[in-house]
Amino acid sequence: MSSFTFSIYHRGVFEKSKFKDYDSLLINMLDRSEVRASYLASIFDDDRDVKKGADTTLMWGQGVGKVSEKAPRTTSTYCDHGFASGERSKGFMADDVITFVLDHQSVLVTFGCGKDQSSGRSSFSNRYSGLVGLGRRLKVGSYSLPSQFGADLMSICLPWFYSGKGSSLSFHITPWRRTTSAKLLINQKFPLFYFVNLYKIFIGDKLLPVHPSWWKFTKGGRKSGVTVDTGTTITNFPLDLYIVFRYLFRREVGDIPVVKGPHKSLDTCYKDDPKGRPLYFPDVKLYFGEVNQKNMLLLSKERVMIHFTGYYCLAFKGWNRSHSVLGSTQLQGIGLTFDTFESTLSFDLDACG
C-alpha cells in the first residue's frame, strides 16, 4: 500500500513575525487554546452525535507538497465552515490530485475550497493556506485524511515550540519506535476523537490519589474519558481532579513560593531565581491501562512547565468538564503512532526536535 508523508512545522514558524517576541507568540497560543477548549466543551456538552468529517482533534501547521493545476472536478456542493477561533470559510467542495513530494505519490483528495475567508469574527493568517483534518478513520461520512486515505496507521511528531526544525506526518507507515503504548478506545458518541486508557498519574514518585474511574467512559461516553488533542496547547483535567493534581505538584516542588502568572489559564507559577540558579520541578508520569514501564509516558521539563516572561508555569489546568484533554505541550517532540487497527497509540520520546 502506498504511503503518504507531509513535512510539518510548528505553527509559530509561520506566525512569529507578527509578534515582537516568543513570549507574545506563546500568550497568543494560550489564548487560542482557551478558544479551542471552549469549542471542545461545546461538542462534549452537545447531545447530538459528532460524525462529520470537518471536525478534527489534531491540527498542526503543515506543508503539503504541490497541488496539480487541473480544475476541480465539481463545483456543485457549497460548503460553509466556521472555526473555533472565529474564522469562517465559504466556498465549495472540490476534488484535486495532490502529489506528496517525499513519497513521489499522487492521490485524489476531496476538500473544501474556500472562496470567502472574510465573513468570520477574525481572519485567517496569510502565512498558510489551509487546514488538515486528522480525525480517526471512519468508513463513511468523513473527509479527514485518515478516512480518505483508508489509513488505520498514522504517525506524527510535533516539533518543539522553540524549534524551527521540520518533522513529518505520515499515513500507512511510521518511522517511530513503539515501545510505549496506550490503548485507543472507541467512543461511539465521538467517533472522530482519539480517546486513550489513562489509568494512573504519578508526580515524582507520589501517586495522584484519585480513583481510575475518573478516566473511564460513563454510559454513552458523553461525560468522561481522556482524548488526545494537539489543537489544545495545555492539558485540561476536570476541575476537582486538577485541584488534587495541583496540590500534590506544589507540595512536591517544596518551599518555592507560588506567584501570580502572566496568563489567566496558568495558576501555578514560580518566578525565575534572581541569581540565575536553576529551578527543579518534578516529573509527571502517565500510566495507561496498568502501572508498567511499557505503558508509561514520562513528562519532564518543558513538557511539564512553560517558561516565559520570567516565570515557570505548570502546563496543566482545570476546567468545568468531566472529560480530560491531553494537549500539545505534553506531546511535543514525541513520535506518535496512531494505529486504529491495533487500537494503540504509541510514544517515541524525543523523536524529533
Image (cartoon, helix red, strand yellow):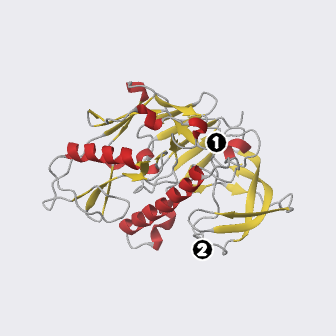
Q: Nearer the viewer, residue 1 or 222?
A: 222
Front of the two marks 2 and 1: 1
- Quadrant (top left/top right/bottom left/bottom right) for the N terminus: top right
Point 38% across, 25% down: residue: 291
Q: Nearer the viewer, residue 148 or 211?
A: 211
Write down the residue under mark 1. Answer: 189
User: Does 262 sit left or right of 53 as displayed?
Assistant: left
Point 44% across, 66% down: residue: 28
Write down the residue under mark 2. Answer: 121
Query: Where residue 266 appears, x then y in whole percent?
Result: 34, 58
Point 76% across, 67% down: residue: 91
How crowded pointer 2 is (Cα within 10 Å; few <14, some 14-19, many 20+) is rated as few
Point 67% across, 74% down: residue: 119
Q: Label 2 is placed on what type of residue? A: Arg
Q: Are marks 2 and 1 in contact (CB under 8 Å)?
A: no
- State the CA–CA distance, disc 2 to disc 1: 29 Å
User: Does 183 sit left or right of 305 as displayed?
Assistant: right
**Label 2 vs 1, first from the N-terminus:** 2
**Residue 126 found in image quarter:** bottom right
User: Does 135 sit left or right of 237 as displayed?
Assistant: right
| Callout 2 secondary element | loop
**Residue 257 found in image quarter:** bottom left
Circle count: 2
**Residue 210 found in image quarter:** top left
Q: Nearer the viewer, residue 329 or 208?
A: 208
Query: Where residue 128 appears, x then y in whole percent?
Result: 60, 64
